[in-house]
Image: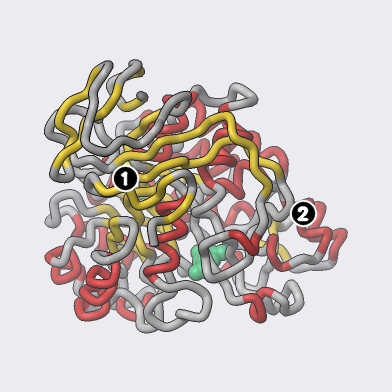
Amino acid sequence: MIDATGERDADVLIADGRVVEVGPGLRGDSELDAAGCVIAPGLVDLHVHLREPGNEDAETIDTGARAAALGGFTAIVAMPNTEPPHDDPTVVASVLAAGAVSLCDVHAAGCITEGRAGAALAPMGELYALGSRIFTDDGACVAEAGVMRRALEYATSLPGAVIAQHAEDPSLADGGHMHEGEWSSRLGITGRPADAENVIVARDCMLAELTGGRVHFLHVSTAGAVELVRSAKARGLAVTAEAAPHHFTLTDAECASFDPVFKVHPPLRSAKDVAAIKIGLADGTIDAIATDHAPHAVETKERPFEEAPPGMLGLETALALTITELVEPGVLSLPEALALLSWRPAAIAGLADHGGPIAPGSAANLCVIDLNVTWRVDPLRLASKSRNTPYVGRTLKGRARHTILRGVPVVVDGQACR
Ligand code: DOR
């Protein structure tokens, strides 16, 4: 068993949704075999697009939550770029209601601005009252410094609230479809420069200092952004950051296939950026691995590269990619990887019932990980309604064997219970 307090050999006894006892030789009325596996707090994903309401052909709250549970997640934060978006308490309430009967705890990020248009602030207080703690216009950057300042100032009056920025300055990135660099020049595809991200991260670190507000940088993808977050943290600013698996496993060279499955915002970057993300994960600069799970219906991703929507699936491959690409090569220890996938993101989102520690009285939100199983990514076997994984055919190591949500097994031996 591994949690934030350390590692030990133990059984976990659960009753009424809570951990009752932790120790060797425990017996219960019904048992899940975890021999040879690691019991960990359930994984927590700060960044998931569930597409409901509005694009249920790509994903629903039910299918997205099932994919999450199969990936070992017990809590996910739904991004607000639905149609209509999460700038309206009735929309957020409906997302939470659907999430409450799904296989994973679903939390709803609220919008920062009305219609995610980057101008007037959304009713953040009302969304906060419904439980939103992360506020973001994700998919769109809050480009106006003054709007970001007001959002940060307002958030300081809401305990635990954090402003999460999609850091890409539209005046630099708009019209681009991949990372601006050698590959975009060779391929003749308009680029989105790394500095589109860097200038917003630099600016928002300054605004965090000015306002005392908390800023979380979504899907950090550049070496420059990692360095800016590192120095902001060294100055004691309330800044956190996440990285997505595709930004530590894939480079812009993938776009040479012209396959839109590799199109994502922010884009796949250079090998130098990928190396910097890995260092940022290893040295604690980056706080969380978050999937940016972005399902798109098959017909939309089959358009030409320039016309296809950005985004790729992530929930069912994140754990295995972390084990295969970071733990196995020695970039991270397993406890460090689990911290990035579970208790550190849980702390950012203020999810007291997730991320452990696994101790008597704590909520029984757990995952049991088989580190030794190898499996091949087959888009047809994913629970997501969409198929846009960039890892088709890859052999990965490690998988969630069981997932337990409030004491109830929702995934057993890699199968969802419904
Ligand atoms: O690639 C992306 N897709 N980046 C985003 O920020 C939004 C997301 C989506 O909603 O598809």
Q: How many angstroms separate mark 2 from mark 1 (CA)?
A: 36 Å
Q: Tag 1: residue type?
A: Ile
Nearest the eye: 358 or 390: 358
Nearest the eye: 107 or 141: 107
Sequence-wise first label, 2 or 1: 2
Can you tell which mark lies on residue 254? 2
Residue at point 49%, 52% (across, down) = 291
Would you name the residue on which mark 1 appears? Answer: 404
Q: Is residue 183 left or right of residue 331?
A: right
Nearest the eye: 105 or 249: 105
Q: Tag 2: residue type?
A: Glu
For mark 2, does the 10 Å Cα neighbourhood hold few (<14), some (14 to 19), or many (20 or more) residues?
some
For residue 388, what is the image quadrant?
Answer: bottom right
Q: Picture coordinates of residue 32 (x, y %)?
A: 35, 36
Q: Picture coordinates of residue 304 (x, y %)?
A: 76, 77
Q: Is residue 218 left or right of residue 2?
A: right
* Quadrant into which the N terminus falls: top left
Q: Residue furthest front?
A: 29
* Quadrant into which the C terminus falls: bottom left
Task: Give the number of callouts.
Answer: 2
| Disc number lying in front (2 or 1) | 1
Decide: is 289 above or below 195.
Answer: above
Q: Picture coordinates of residue 130 (x, y %)?
A: 15, 66
Label 2 secondary element: helix
Residue at point 85%, 63% (across, down) = 187
Contact check, label 2 and label 1, Cβ < 8 Å: no
The residue carrying mark 2 has its beta carbon less than 8 Å from ligand 1: no
Residue at point 63%, 58% (across, down) = 267
